[in-house]
Amino acid sequence: MEFPEDFNQLELLDTHGDLIPRGARSSWTASKDDEAEVDEGERTEEWYQKKEELLKDKPKELILWAAENNRLSTILRLLAADPLLVHTCDEDCYTPLHRAAYSGHVEVVCALLAGGSEVDPRTIDGWTPLHSACRWSHVAVASCLLQHGAELNAQTNGGLTPLHLAASYTSSSKIDSTHILELLLSKRTLRPGLHSSSGETAGDVARRSGPHYFLFEMVEDCVSVVPS
């Protein structure tokens, strides 16, 4: 699917957000003989073990699946056998770190970083794991990535920063949406005035998309009342 250079990527998220990987909703290549997927809340340990058994001879697929599904022990076992698996990516260039980030699995994120994962790998759309964490308001993951040097002001191919994605207010939790914005806006190196390819700043997005625009007062220029 091709889009003009000036298309609004955030509007695309609103209309086609179901196509963006998000935890258990993302796609992965499995056996055609595999049984139908079950809801995440209905998954048992037996179900996870069966999945791992199906992928045991496909370590690259297995580590991607394990990162997305919070299978920390499986990831540690795979990396002990082959440390280079940490750099695996799928056809859209999502790495295990991306998958753990958009799923909100902070322990897996930390393990992958400790195992040698780059902190800012890019998907074909230019998304970093920090973009993924901020898109879904995973505060602990975003904090961990920033502590490991993630680029706070990284822009996607459409010019979106993590702040743009946090400002779009897409989380089902109002509290999480507030906290992710507070985290980003508290950073001294933040560049809130960066524009997306559609010409919007993150503040513009917040103004039209959600109830948290007032938080941007944290980074607005203050009027000095001190006599000159």
Image: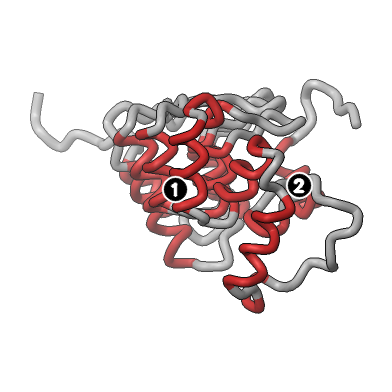
The C terminus sits in image quarter:
top left
For residue 63, side relative to residue 212 (left or right): right
Residue 8, visible in the rendered structure: yes
Compared with 107, 164 (above or below) is: above
Q: Specify the farthest residue to the left.
A: 227
Residue 227 placement: quadrant? top left
Identify the residue at image location x=35%, y=42%.
144
Amino acid under disc 2 = Trp
Q: Amino acid at mark 1?
A: Val
Say which residue appears at 63% left-offset and 64% top-offset.
Answer: 48
| Crowding near the residue tagged with mark 2, few <14, some 14–19, many ≥20 C-alpha atoms within 10 Å | some
CA separation, marks 2 and 1? 18 Å
Find residue 130 and report its horizontal and vertical position in percent. Answer: 49, 37
- Which residue is identified by label 2? 28
Q: How is the image coloured?
A: secondary structure
Q: What is the number of the mark on residue 108?
A: 1
Toward the viewer: 157 or 100?
100
Give the residue drawn at x 34%, y 47%: 183
Between disc 2 and disc 1, whose residue precedes?
A: 2
Q: Residue at x 69, y 63 (%)?
A: 50
Picture coordinates of residue 96, whole percent (x, y) = 57, 38
